[in-house]
Image (cartoon, rainbow, N blue to C red):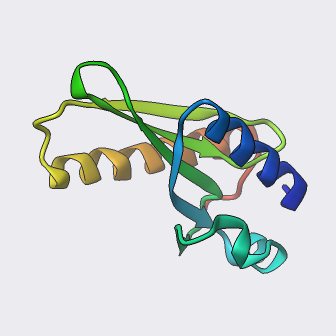
Amino acid sequence: MIGEREVKEILTQYEKHGWSLRRVLLSAEIERNLPAMLFGQTEVVTSDLNALWFSRFSFEGRETWELRHLSNTPFALVEVFEVDDEEDVREEMRCEMQTKLAEQASKSGNKKVT
């Protein structure tokens, strides 16, 4: 199980490269073991998936979102949104990314999918 020190390291690494923490997805078990102040004012959502959503602006007004899995074998999915993409389209893509990440985590043995 990932702990506070590892999460802090991830947050520091992403911040160093210009990413902003946008959303936190945590299982009840992980959430109980991490201090709430660790994520500042960022929304924490109870989920079967343990992951962090980061975003940053990229070239030509695009916005890149990355879903970083919290596990001993880290991996992430990335999506680049166009400046004119509507928020409902973006949210649909983010939901799809969460589903894909959960499937990948299940295959790698990092998470039980119920």
Q: Residue at x 57, y 63 (%)?
A: 25
Q: In front here: 19 or 68?
A: 19
Residue toward you, 67 or 4: 4
- Residue 46 position (above or below residue 70): below
82 lies left or right of 58? left
Q: Is residue 12 left or right of residue 81?
A: right
Return the x and y of residue 22 as percentages of the image width and height.
Answer: 47, 56
Please tell me which residue lies in front, 18 or 72.
Answer: 18
Q: Check the image and report above or below for 66 versus 5.
A: above
Q: Residue at x 37, y 32 (%)?
A: 79
Q: Identify the image quadrant of residue 41.
A: bottom right
Q: Nearer the viewer, residue 83 or 52?
A: 83
Quadrant of the rendered image containing residue 80: top left
| Residue 103 falls left or right of residue 90 | right
In percent of width and height, residue 110 lies at 76, 47
Q: Position of residue 49 (x, y in %)?
A: 60, 59
Name, please, the residue furthest toward the top. Answer: 59
Q: Which residue is at a point 85% across and 61% down the rendered structure image?
A: 4
User: Which residue shows up at 10% across the image and 36% down it?
Assistant: 84
98 relative to 49, above or below: above
Residue 42 seen anywhere in this rendered image of the structure: yes
Quadrant for the N terminus in the image: bottom right
Quarter of the image with the C terminus is: bottom right
How many marks the image carries: the answer is 0
Q: Is residue 3 visible?
A: no
